[in-house]
């Protein structure tokens, strides 16, 4: 069945699995593909992750130019238990020692159900900048870095919205976080933009959304 022949999914069964109070659930579907001529495929299982609090996420590049005119970006190191606990060395195609529990990323957060439209994403970016980095950002000063992108379309319908905002490093205050233990002991620092991208290529930063957002920022603001 080609894309031209595909008409719709036929849902044979639909179940949601997960612990009460959890952030993520697995939606397990049994599907058939129906073609435009009415024929259907064999049954198959499609599992993907859902997040009740909000489907999408915003990724925020906070930046400024130093006295030499170089673009500095704010990086953040925080806990990511899944990387430390979910990657068995015996199961890895290429063994590595770069995964968790501390991971370097950009400021980011879930776009919650009430955050509607581009203004809602900008508002959420400003909230995350305050919670995770200690910067007060006017949502009107948040700009998009192109279109949103799906990081893992085979297992989660989440889209990343990549944005940026210029800040004055002298105005940074203590980040109050969102109350989660995952944000305990997180730290931020400034890094020159090209160096941060080089660190991504070298594997010193292993977060894909961070590399993509940094590269888009360079395309936008560096001559």
Image (cartoon, rainbow, N blue to C red):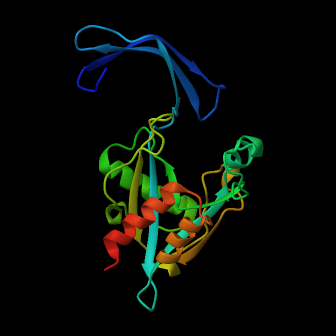
In this view of the protein, which residue sits in the foreground, 183 or 67? 67
Can see residue 123? Answer: yes
- In the image, is residue 159 above or below residue 203? above
**What is the x, y in percent for residue 114?**
40, 40
Q: Quadrant of residue 123?
A: bottom left
Q: Quadrant of residue 8?
A: top left
In this view of the protein, which residue sits in the foreground, 53 or 189? 189
**What is the x, y in percent for residue 204?**
63, 66
Q: In which quadrant is the N terminus drawn?
A: top left
Can see residue 137? Answer: no
Seen at 52% across and 60% down, the residue is 107
Question: How many marks on residues?
Answer: 0
In this view of the protein, which residue sits in the foreground, 42 or 152? 42
Q: Quadrant of residue 150?
A: top left
Q: In which quadrant is the C terminus drawn?
A: bottom left
Seen at 38% across and 71% down, the residue is 218
Q: Is residue 79 left or right of residue 150?
A: right
**What is the x, y in percent for residue 92?**
69, 45
């Amino acid at each position: 069945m080609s894309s031209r022949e595909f008409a719709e999914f036929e849902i044979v069964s639909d179940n949601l699995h997960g612990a009460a109070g959890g952030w993520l659930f697995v939606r397990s579907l049994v599907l058939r593909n129906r073609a435009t001529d009415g024929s259907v495929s064999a049954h198959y299982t499609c599992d993907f992750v859902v997040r009740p609090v909000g489907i999408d996420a915003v990724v925020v590049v906070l930046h400024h130019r130093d006295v030499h005119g170089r673009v500095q970006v704010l990086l953040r190191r925080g806990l990511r238990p899944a990387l430390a606990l979910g990657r068995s060395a015996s199961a890895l195609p290429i063994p590595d020692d770069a995964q968790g529990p501390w991971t370097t990323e950009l400021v980011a957060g879930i776009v919650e159900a009430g955050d509607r439209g581009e203004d809602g994403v900008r508002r959420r970016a400003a909230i995350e900048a305050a919670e995770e980095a200690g910067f007060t950002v006017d949502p009107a000063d948040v700009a998009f870095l192109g279109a949103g992108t799906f990081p893992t379309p085979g297992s989660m319908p989440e889209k990343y919205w990549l944005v940026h905002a210029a800040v004055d490093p002298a105005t940074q205050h203590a980040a109050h976080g969102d109350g989660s233990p995952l944000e305990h002991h997180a730290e931020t620092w400034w890094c020159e933009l090209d160096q941060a991208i080089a660190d991504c290529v070298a594997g010193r930063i292993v977060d894909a959304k961070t590399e993509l957002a940094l590269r888009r920022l360079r395309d936008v603001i560096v001559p």
